[in-house]
Image: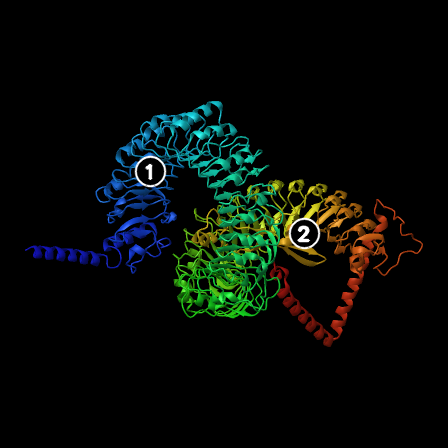
């Protein structure tokens, strides 16, 4: 009978196990898998966050954000932080979504736009089902009042931890909440809007052990009442509030407190406060952690800290200590923070040597006038962080007695000396040493080899030198991390000096010099690296090729050999074959040649490949997506690729960054060549290829695309009329194509539009400019130049952020609208080569940031307003080829004409998305206290401002860095009259001055000799008289000088300096000028210093123009009549004449069609 019962029980147990196994044969319960798939479309319909939450993947325990119990297979943790598409707007939660997860213990819904819960669908619906839910995170949402949060809570009796931080709560509803959450132990209300009334509202949370109220509006009044109710409270955080010294007496009742944070408050250590502080020390007998940083405490309070006998961690950073009082009595203190302190005296630092338990000292960003030897008496100190501090030069020589030290971080101290051969080398137990950014010079001392336990050595950003193979690094047998980047080391290409360091995992030697290694060095090292970076290490071409030891590496995750000159190296497919865990590969500008030869086997972990700037040719292999299935960032710009984008990219959901610009790729770009609308792609650059056909509409509607650059191709047709209202584009550049039709009106039309830059220039767009282009919120750069746009400039816009406007080379008409008055941030305004009319408005001075102002080749008229002189930042003013008249404003001499980076290029908002950190490797090998800089992938956008100036009938285009220093004034081809203001000689920073083809009279100002930087001076085709000032020969930078076709007289300037390079064309058309390089010589009796009389009436220097016009007209009529008579008499000549005329017409037509200036001018 007993055996039968046992058999029955065993069978029942077996059936239960089988049933349980069948229910979760794919790793999780089917009910829970279905529940998760129902959640996904509600919060992430485009599969950005929940990319692996798919129907065909049945093991939901492996999905991102999911953790299951190893025994039951049920979901016990669900993390949905920032999982919801924010474009969906506010989220009113229906908590019944989580009913299938009966074993759920932790739920994270932070940063999802939650504003409340549906009526009767809050967490009360889970109260009978989710009895094990203990942790709930609702931080960084939009709960804007306490009723909204109360609508979610009416249950969850088992909840122990609740995070409501970073919402907009006042705390008034927490009293009701405390009656519902009786078991709550951890409550986080930081970064809300609570005031002191909250203390009475949370008295009901009698089980609380941790209360975080940081970053609210608290003064501490009423806190004493709370202390009598929360007897179990162990952690109290009140940082970033408005508490003063009176807070000390309010905290004395929290006798169980272990951690107290009062940092970032208004504590001063007044006499009253010190007495309360002394009472506090005697009351908090269990306190282990005290944070008092970022207050205004002084040395007086230090002597009273001895009462906290149980203290283990103390933070006193950023106060007003001077170091005149010691710190005594803290026998259990293990960690001390004294950062950003001005130690005028060394008593405080000296006293630390007597603290028997002190293990960690962090006094970074401090100033040490004296650094006594008392600290070196410590027998327990293991970690010292003094980064970015001011230390005496003797520090490294005196630190030797700290024999227990394991970590020493001295980054950014700027010792500006050589490494001493004593002191620091005696730290035999040292495991981590950080000396980066210290301006250290010379070679590594031999005593470095004494640090036999060293695991991490950081020496980057110094001026250390010598062949690293001859250093004593080979003695550091425990070394795992080595960074010597940005020095002057010579690093053998085989890394032979590291061959015996079997523990080495990380090498960074960027910006040094790779050299050929001696032939006797072994080729196979004992180490297997995870990280190797040696970028920019070959100032000269290196015949040896890639570093040889890499062929024997099989665990590499990160490789960067960018900006090296490896002669004739093929693409290293062996790197992928040998290192299946390779994650990042950077081979930019390494002289790689040949085709892109992919490995035969997949590299499943590869995310980033950057091989831009090489000479790789051929097509991208069609199977690239299967070889690199998780590829995120693919950069092959500036190569010689041909063919098309592989079709598999259209289905590659992981692809985020694609740059194939500046190649020879050609095909009709179709939608299946690019990722779909819901893809993760955020950067797409196909500039300067030969892609053709119509632009795929889906390209403009990718939900997460931030940068779209398709310029310099052969796309045709019209752009889709409207863009997706959900478009998140920051930068759009489809310039220099063959696009036509009307400008797309959807750009900037959405209230969610965040465009920073639009470039549609050099196409065939027509019609008017939609006002949406000037109403896009945040738009800074707009270039619609060289199209066929017509009509007037838009009216009624409010583009307050607009800084760069380029509309030149169109057919725009009308005046400059008053709406430009509000563009106070405008840096460049180029309206040249249009049909704009009217005067320059008087409100022009409101454009206070304007640096480049171009109105050339329009129909503007009137006088120049004196408000132009108020544009203090103006450096380039081009008003040529208009109908301006009147006198030159002398006040233009007030322009500063200073250099400016803003006018040279546009810096778009940039988002780094290639999340990778050297710190990942560092943490994997146990590194502490320091995290190196991230290796990041930035969007590469080069937007250079270009300006075309005219000198001697030639066009000169200035862009990029040279434009930074360029300053020019071009008022040529107008109807200005009068004299050139002598005050313009004060424009000492000007580089180009063109006043040609006006009606100017008078003398050339001798003050022009002050224009010391001028390179081009054109005063031709005017009515200037008198002598050319001899002082102009002092202009030693002058490259273009033209005073032709005036009425100048006297001797030409002496042929020396730059004037020795000017030929006769610079002076022709001035009959009264003489001397070289002109053919007519001056009167031999005339002294070189003879003065030409200044004829105030101007008669002496002018030709009789009336006589000239009369004689010219008579001669012209006689010639025409003679030709007409001959043609009438001789029919053969008549036929030949008309044939000649027809040939001339055809020739002129072809010449104008090809060379018409507006069609042929190339700006970029």
Does residue 90 appear to the left or right of 390 in the view shown? left
Circle nearer the N terminus (2, 1): 1
Q: Secondary structure at mark 2?
A: loop
Rendered location of residue 786, percent (x, y): 57, 57
Number of other residues with Cα within 10 Å of mark 1, as a class: few under 14, some 14 to 19, many 20 or more:
many
Depth-wise, is mark 2 or mark 1 nearer the camera? 1
Q: Secondary structure at mark 1?
A: strand
Q: Can you say whether 1121 is above or below 657 in the image? A: below
Q: Is residue 811 visible?
A: no
Q: Residue placed at 62% from the left, 55% from the top? A: 959
Residue 123 visible somewhere in the drawing: yes
Task: Indicate the position of residue 548 as horizontal and vertical percent values.
Answer: 52, 67
Which is nearer the eye, 657 or 880? 657
Quadrant where the C terminus sits is bottom right
> Disc 2 marks which residue?
880
Q: Is residue 62 above or below residue 382?
A: below
Residue reaching furthest to the right: 1085
């Amino acid at each position: 009978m007993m055996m039968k019962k046992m058999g029955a029980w065993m069978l029942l147990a077996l059936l239960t196990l089988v049933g349980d196994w069948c229910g979760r044969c794919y790793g999780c319960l089917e009910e829970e898998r279905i529940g998760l798939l129902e959640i996904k479309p509600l919060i992430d319909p485009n599969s950005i966050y929940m990319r692996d939450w798919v129907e065909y993947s049945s093991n939901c325990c492996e999905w991102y954000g999911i953790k299951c119990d190893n025994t039951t297979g049920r979901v016990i943790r669900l993390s949905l932080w920032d999982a919801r598409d924010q474009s969906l707007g506010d989220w009113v939660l229906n908590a019944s979504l989580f009913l299938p997860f009966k074993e759920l213990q932790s739920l994270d819904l932070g940063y999802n736009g939650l504003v409340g819960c549906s009526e009767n669908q809050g967490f009360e619906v889970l109260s009978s089902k989710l009895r094990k839910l203990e942790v709930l995170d609702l931080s960084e949402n939009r709960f804007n009042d306490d009723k909204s949060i109360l609508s979610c809570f009416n249950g969850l009796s088992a909840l122990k931890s609740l995070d409501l931080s970073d919402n907009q709560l006042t705390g008034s509803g927490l009293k009701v909440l405390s009656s519902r959450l009786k078991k709550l132990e951890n409550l986080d209300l930081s970064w809300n809007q609570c005031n002191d009334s909250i203390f009475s509202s949370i008295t009901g949370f009698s089980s609380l052990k941790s209360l975080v109220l940081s970053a609210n509006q608290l003064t501490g009044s009423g806190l004493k009442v709370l202390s009598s109710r929360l007897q179990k409270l162990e952690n109290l955080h009140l940082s970033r509030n408005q508490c003063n010294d009176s807070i000390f007496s309010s905290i004395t009742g929290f006798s169980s407190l272990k951690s107290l944070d009062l940092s970032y408050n208004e504590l001063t250590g007044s006499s009253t406060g010190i007495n309360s502080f002394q009472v506090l020390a005697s009351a908090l007998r269990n306190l282990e952690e005290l944070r008092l940083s970022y207050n205004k405490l002084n040395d007086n309070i230090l002597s009273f800290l001895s009462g906290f006998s149980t203290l283990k961690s103390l933070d006193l950073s950023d106060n007003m200590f001077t170091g005149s009082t010691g710190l005594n009595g803290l026998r259990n203190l293990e960690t001390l923070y004294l950062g950003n302190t001005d130690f005028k005296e060394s008593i405080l630092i000296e006293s630390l040597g007597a603290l028997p338990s002190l293990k960690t000292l962090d006094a970074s960003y401090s100033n040490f006038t004296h650094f006594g030897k008392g600290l070196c008496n410590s027998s327990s100190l293991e970690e010292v962080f003094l980064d970015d501090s001011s230390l005496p030069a003797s520090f490294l020589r005196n630190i030797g007695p700290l024999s227990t030290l394991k970590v020493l971080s001295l980054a950014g101290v700027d010792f500006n000396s050589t490494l001493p051969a004593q002191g620091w080398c005696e730290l035999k137990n040292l495991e981590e040493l950080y000396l980066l950014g210290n301006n250290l010079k010379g070679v590594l001392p031999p005593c470095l080899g004494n640090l036999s336990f060293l695991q991490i050595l950081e020496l980057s950003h110094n001026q250390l030198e010598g062949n690293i193979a001859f250093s004593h690094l080979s003695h550091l047998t425990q070394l795992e991390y080595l960074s010597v980047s940005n020095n002057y080391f010579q690093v053998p290409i085989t890394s032979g000096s590291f061959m015996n360091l079997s523990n080495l995992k990380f090498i960074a030697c960027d910006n040094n010099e790779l050299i050929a290694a001696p032939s006797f060095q072994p080729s196979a090292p004992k180490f297997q690296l995870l990280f190797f970076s040696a970028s920019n290490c070959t100032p000269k071409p290196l015949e040896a090729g890639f570093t040889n030891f890499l062929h024997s590496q099989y665990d590499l995750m990160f490789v960067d050999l960018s900006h090296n000159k490896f002669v004739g190296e093929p693409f290293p497919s062996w790197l992928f074959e040998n290192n299946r865990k390779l994650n990042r590969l950077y081979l930019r500008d390494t002289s790689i040649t040949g085709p892109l030869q992919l490995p035969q086997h997949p590299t499943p972990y590869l995310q980033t490949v950057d091989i831009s700037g090489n000479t790789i040719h051929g097509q991208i292999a069609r199977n690239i997506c299967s070889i690199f299935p998780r590829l995120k960032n693919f950069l092959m710009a500036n190569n010689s690729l041909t063919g098309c984008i592989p079709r598999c990219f259209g289905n590659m959901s992981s692809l985020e960054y694609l740059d194939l610009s500046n190649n020879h790729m050609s095909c009709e770009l179709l939608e299946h060549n690019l990722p779909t609308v819901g893809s993760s792609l955020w950067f797409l650059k196909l500039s300067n290829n030969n892609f053709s056909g119509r632009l795929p509409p889906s390209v403009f509607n990718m939900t997460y695309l931030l940068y779209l650059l398709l310029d310099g191709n052969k796309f045709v047709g019209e752009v889709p009329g409207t863009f997706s209202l959900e478009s998140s584009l920051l930068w759009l550049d489809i310039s220099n194509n063959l696009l036509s039709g009307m400008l797309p009106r959807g750009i900037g039309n959405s209230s969610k539009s965040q465009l920073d830059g639009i470039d549609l220039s050099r196409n065939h767009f027509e019609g008017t400019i939609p006002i949406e282009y000037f109403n896009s919120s945040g738009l800074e750069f707009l270039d619609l130049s060289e199209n066929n746009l017509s009509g007037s400039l838009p009216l009624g816009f409010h583009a307050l952020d607009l800084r760069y406007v380029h509309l030149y080379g169109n057919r725009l008409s009308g005046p400059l609208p008053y709406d430009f008055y509000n563009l106070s941030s405008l840096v460049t305004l180029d309206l040249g080569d249009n049909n704009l009319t009217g005067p320059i408005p008087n409100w022009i001075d409101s454009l206070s940031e304007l640096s480049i102002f171009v109105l050339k080749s329009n129909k503007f008229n009137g006088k120049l307003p004196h408000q132009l002189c108020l544009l203090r930042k103006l450096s380039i003013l081009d008003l040529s080829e208009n109908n301006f008249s009147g006198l030159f404003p002398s006040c233009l001499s007030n322009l500063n004409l200073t250099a400016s980076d803003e006018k040279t290029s546009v810096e778009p908002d940039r988002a780094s998305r290639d999340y990778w950190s050297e710190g990942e490797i560092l943490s994997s090998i146990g590194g502490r206290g320091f995290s190196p800089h991230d290796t990041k992938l930035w969007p590469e956008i080069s937007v250079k401002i270009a300006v075309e100036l005219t000198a001697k009938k030639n066009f000169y285009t200035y862009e990029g860095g040279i434009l930074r220093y360029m300053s020019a004034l071009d008022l040529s081809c107008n109807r200005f009259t009068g004299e050139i203001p002598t005050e313009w000689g004060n424009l000492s920073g000007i580089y180009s001055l063109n006043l040609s083809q006006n009606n100017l009279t008078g003398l050339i100002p001798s003050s022009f000799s002050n224009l010391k930087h001028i390179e081009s001076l054109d005063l031709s085709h005017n009515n200037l008289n008198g002598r050319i000032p001899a002082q102009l020969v002092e202009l030693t930078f002058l490259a273009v000088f033209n005073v032709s076709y005036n009425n100048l007289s006297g001797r030409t300037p002496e042929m020396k300096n730059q004037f020795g390079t000017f030929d006769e064309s610079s002076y022709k058309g001035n009959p009264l000028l003489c001397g070289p390089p002109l053919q007519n010589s001056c009167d031999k009796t005339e002294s070189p210093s003879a003065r030409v009389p200044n004829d105030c009436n101007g008669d002496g220097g002018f030709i009789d123009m009336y006589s000239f016009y009369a004689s010219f007209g008579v001669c012209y009529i006689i010639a025409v009549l003679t030709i007409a008579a001959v043609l009438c008499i001789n029919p053969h000549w008549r036929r030949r004449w008309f044939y000649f005329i027809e040939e001339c017409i055809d020739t002129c037509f072809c010449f104008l069609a090809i060379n018409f200036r507006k069609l042929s001018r190339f700006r970029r």
